[in-house]
Image: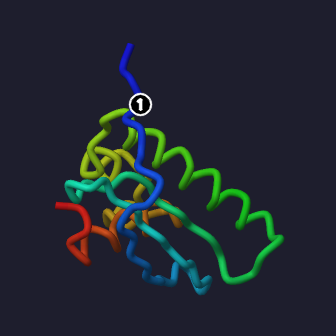
Amino acid sequence: MITREKLPTRREAEHFEFVFRGRKFEVGVGRHPDGRIAEVFLSTAKSGAEMQAIARDAAITISIMLQHGAPLPVLRAAVTRDHDGNADSPIGALLDRMHELEIIQ
């Protein structure tokens, strides 16, 4: 059984925004003390919407996977893409944007 890597109470974080199919998303990325990504927070500008819940749940899932050792480039490669290789969901767009910003190495 793989053990979840516990996060410190206080940790580095960075924030950015991106737009996917006309909807603005806000992102927070928390890091371990050594700089590795530990967690992702994702929300839409319009709270209370179904997409808000989906975005938060997806970010929680990504965070748990990271804390169990899943590499972000593997997650990025696994998300659904269209026939041109573009992200087909906000989650894929998030991972692509993190790659563009060199948050994913």
Residue at position x 80%, y 70% from top?
49
Q: 10 or 93: which is nearer to us? A: 10
Assess disc 1: are there few (<14), some (14-19) or many (≥20) residues with their C-alpha within 10 Å of its C-alpha: few
Q: Position of residue 78 (x, y in %)?
A: 35, 45
Relative side of 11 to 25, left or right = left
Residue drawn 25% across and 54% down?
Answer: 36
Q: Which residue is mark 1?
A: 4
19 relative to 92, above or below: below
Percent coordinates x, y for residue 94 in the rendering: 43, 68
Where on the picture, by quarter, is residue 44? bottom right
Quadrant where the image shows the C terminus: bottom left
Q: Is residue 5 above or below residue 103?
A: above
At horizontal 33% and vertical 53% (from top left) the residue drawn is 76
| Spot occupied by residue 30 in the image (x, y as percentages of width and height) | 40, 62
Amino acid carrying label 1: it is: Arg
Left or right: residue 43 versus residue 33 is: right
Image spot of residue 53 (x, y percent): 73, 59
Q: Is residue 28 above or below residue 75?
A: below
> Could you tell me how many numbered marks the image carries?
1
